[in-house]
Amino acid sequence: MNQKVKEFLDKAREREIKKRNEYLIKLGLYEKEFAPITRTGWGSITDSDGNSKTLKFNLNSENVKVGDAVKVPYDNKKWDVVVEKIEVDNQHTTPAEYQYFEYDAELKTSRGYKKVPIEVTDDEYNQILMSVGKPSGSSYNVIATIMTVIAIIVFIGGFIGGCVMIEEFVIALIVWASSFTGGMMFLGFAEIINLLTAIKNK
């Protein structure tokens, strides 16, 4: 296969996948991927000199809860420390990527997440389209439809108006010509909008 043809087909496939993923998310067919968080634990130990020390340490697992015992390195050895307090920091969340937020009752903080469309096969996606219909291009399609309806009304109104004034043939011709010109202008604008929408959705 020619390299340029291959590149063109690859880009077209990428656009189709992106469009499909956006539609799946719009339909609610997605999973929540939460932003990574930093969990800091606090706990106390009694060192070899008998002094009480409060240690601050990172928790690598989200399953650790207050009251659990973890191994914490301190003074060149690892200590068994009971977690007395946990602090959560998710301030590094990137808003552009994790633009949705949900309150986590267990962590007692809001966590950012992004919507990840569920994986579907081409057959499954086609069945989805058969069930709910294809995604609409944009609101411009509605505008194009309205302009088409207006054009038809202008055509019909002009034809009837010309027939009413048929006794004044010159005036009737002017009415017919004006309605035809106006109707064609509306149809032309509607077709332009449809073409622009089709180009945008490619």
Image (spheres, helix red, strand yellow):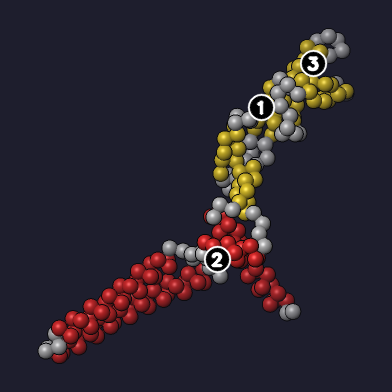
Give the alpha-carbon distance from disc 3 to disc 1, as whole Å.
Answer: 19 Å
Q: Earlier in the sequence, mark 3 or mark 2?
A: 3
193 horizontally vs 184: left or right:
right
Q: Position of residue 190 (x, y in %)?
A: 39, 74
75 horizontally vs 41: left or right:
right
The residue located at (53%, 68%) in the rendering is 201
Residue on which disc 3 sits: 45
Give the alpha-carbon distance from disc 3 to disc 2, as whole Å.
Answer: 63 Å
Q: Is residue 63 visible in this depiction of the protein?
A: yes
Question: Alpha-carbon neighbours of circle 3 within 10 Å: few (<14), some, or many (≥20)?
Answer: some
Quarter in which the N terminus is drawn: bottom right
Residue on which disc 2 sits: 130
Q: Earlier in the sequence, mark 1 or mark 2?
A: 1
- In the structure shown, which secondary structural element does the residue marked by tag 2 occupy? helix
137 horizontally vs 174: left or right:
right
The residue located at (79%, 21%) in the rendering is 81
